[in-house]
Each structure stands twice: as C-alpha cells, then as structure tokens.
C-alpha cells in the first residue's frame, strides 16, 4: 500500500471534504486521491470535460449522485458533497474514515 491520502472536513462549508497539499507542493496530486476513492467506495473514477475546451474534471457516481473532485486555486483538492443526498454523504464520509487508504487530519 502506498502513502495514505489525508483529508479533512471543511468547517466553513457544509459537506465539503478537503484534501490538503503537502508542504512544498504547489498542487495536490489527484491520482492517489482517485485511486483511494475507487478502492474505498468501489467506484470507477473518470475524467471528463465540463466544457468543450475546459480542464478534465475527475468524477464518479455513487448511490445515484454524480460527484466531482476539483482543484482549488490554492492547490488543495475538494470533494463537494453539499448537493448530495444525506445518506450518500454520510456513507461516503464514514467509508473514508474507516478506510486504510485515507487519513483524517
């Protein structure tokens, strides 16, 4: 197993999970996050463009909800669960807390 992916629940924004970057990095690498999400939630993460020439956004479907992983201007990645169903949101957070692939900050 590779290094665990760190995450934290955003205290200011309800339902937002942040993946902070390590010191010295300008961007958080998305590949380890995508792989950990795929293993933990048993989903297939795919990168799709939102607009014709826009950046590719990793997204996956879980319990009927389509969720996307975004990189902020600060370099941190976020998974926005605020628009997801309550049951899906709580299930995802609980799976991430119990998974060996993730580490809560």
Image (tube, grey):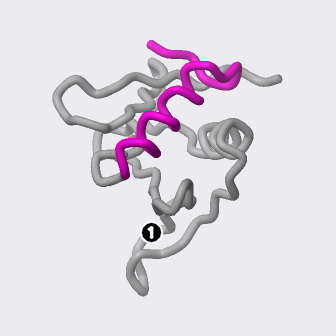
In the image, 29: left or right of 83? right
Count the numbered circles shown.
1
Residue displayed at 70% across by 19% down: 100
Residue displayed at 36% across by 52% down: 84
Q: Is residue 25 above or below residue 3?
A: below
Quarter assignment of residue 62? bottom right
Question: Is 14 covered by the magenta stretch?
Answer: no
Residue at the top extreme, as displayed: 105
In the image, 93: left or right of 14? right
Q: Is residue 89 above or below residue 83?
A: above
Q: What secondary structure prevails in the magenta region?
A: helix
| Secondary element at tag 1 | loop
Q: Quadrant of the N terminus?
A: top right
Q: Magenta part of the protein: which range? A: 85-105
Q: Which residue is tagged 1?
A: 55
Quarter assignment of residue 20? top left
């Amino acid at each position: 197993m590779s290094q665990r992916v760190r995450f934290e629940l955003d205290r200011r924004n309800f339902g937002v999970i942040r993946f902070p970057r390590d010191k010295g990095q300008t961007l958080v690498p998305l590949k380890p996050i995508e792989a950990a999400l795929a293993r933990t939630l048993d989903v297939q993460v795919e990168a799709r463009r939102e607009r014709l020439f826009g950046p590719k956004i990793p997204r996956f479907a879980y319990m009927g909800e389509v969720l996307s992983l975004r990189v902020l201007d600060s370099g941190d990645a976020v998974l926005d669960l605020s628009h997801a169903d309550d049951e899906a949101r709580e299930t995802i957070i609980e799976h991430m807390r119990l998974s060996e692939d993730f580490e809560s900050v």
